[in-house]
Image (spheres, grey):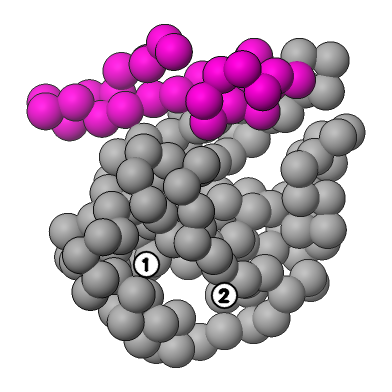
């Protein structure tokens, strides 16, 4: 898998999260928050076992609530997204993803271990800093309910 890096954050989810930044996004949104991550060759190639070793070290810290998969776009590395989200769920952590693709474009097996999705492309003319977790007002926040169904959350 190709990653641009990871960092601790308290702004990309509820609670304290580790954000993993995937390399590559073909959408090319104007005004993108991470334009360098659109390049699929940005960052470094990392073996799955090396990333899991890092994840395991970090996620054994009880004060880490969530893993956030961002980018670039994690959906453009589907096998990596599935592996990382499953590992996070095995460690009993909540999983969030940010993607420019609509939820209706995401297969069930891809998002099986995901709890929250922020979807939709960033649209510069609809930019906002007034709505938590959204870069532009067209984006939607989806949360999986107790029946394993997706519900849109209006903030």
* Residue 49, magenta (yes or no): no
Q: Earlier in the sequence, mark 2 or mark 1?
A: 2
Label 1: how many Cα within 10 Å (few below 14, some 14–19, many 20+): some
Seen in the picture, residue 153 relative to 111 is either above or below; the reply is above
**Quadrant location of the N terminus?**
bottom right
Q: Say which residue appears at 17% left-offset and 31% top-offset.
A: 148
* Residue identifier under label 1: 83
**Is 119 on the left or on the right of 112, as rendered?**
right
Picture layout, residue 83 above or below residue 125: below
Characterize the magenta stretch by its predominant secondary structure. loop
Query: Is-magenta flag for residue 153?
Result: yes
Going by the picture, which residue comes out furthest to the top? 154
Please name whichever residue, 39 or 54, is drawn nearer the observer in this view of the structure.
54
For mark 2, give the secondary structure.
loop
- Mark 1: secondary structure: helix
User: What segment is highlighted magenta in the picture?
Assistant: 127-155
Task: Tell me how far mark 2 sits from mark 1, CA to CA.
Answer: 10 Å
For residue 114, say whether it is visible: no
Q: Would you name the residue on which mark 2 appears? A: 1
**41, 63: nearer the viewer:** 63
Residue at x 76%, y 50% (from the top left corner): 34
Q: What residue is rendered at 34% in x and 75% in y? A: 58
Marks 2 and 1 in Cβ contact (< 8 Å): yes
Image coordinates of residue 48 in percent, x first then y, are: 44, 82
Left or right of 73, for residue 126: right
> Vertical placement of 93 versus 115: above or below?
below
Quarter containing the C terminus: top left
Left or right for 9, reference 87? right
Which percent across, then down, holds residue 40? Answer: 76, 64
The image quarter in which residue 56 lies: bottom left
Residue lying farthest to the right in this orientation:
30
């Amino acid at each position: 898998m190709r990653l641009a890096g990871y960092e601790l954050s308290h702004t990309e989810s509820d609670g304290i999260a580790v954000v993993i930044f995937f390399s590559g996004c073909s959408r090319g949104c104007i005004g993108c928050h991470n334009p360098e991550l659109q390049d699929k060759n940005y960052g470094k190639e990392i073996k799955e076992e090396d990333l899991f070793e890092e994840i395991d070290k970090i996620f054994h810290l009880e004060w880490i609530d969530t893993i956030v998969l961002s980018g670039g776009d994690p959906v453009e590395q589907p096998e990596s997204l599935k592996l990382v989200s499953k590992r996070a769920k095995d460690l009993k952590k909540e999983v969030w993803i940010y993607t420019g693709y609509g939820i209706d474009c995401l297969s069930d097996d891809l998002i099986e271990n995901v709890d929250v999705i922020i979807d939709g492309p960033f649209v510069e003319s609809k930019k906002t800093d007034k709505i938590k977790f959204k870069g532009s007002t067209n984006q939607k926040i989806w949360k999986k309910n107790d029946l394993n169904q997706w519900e849109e959350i209006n903030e």
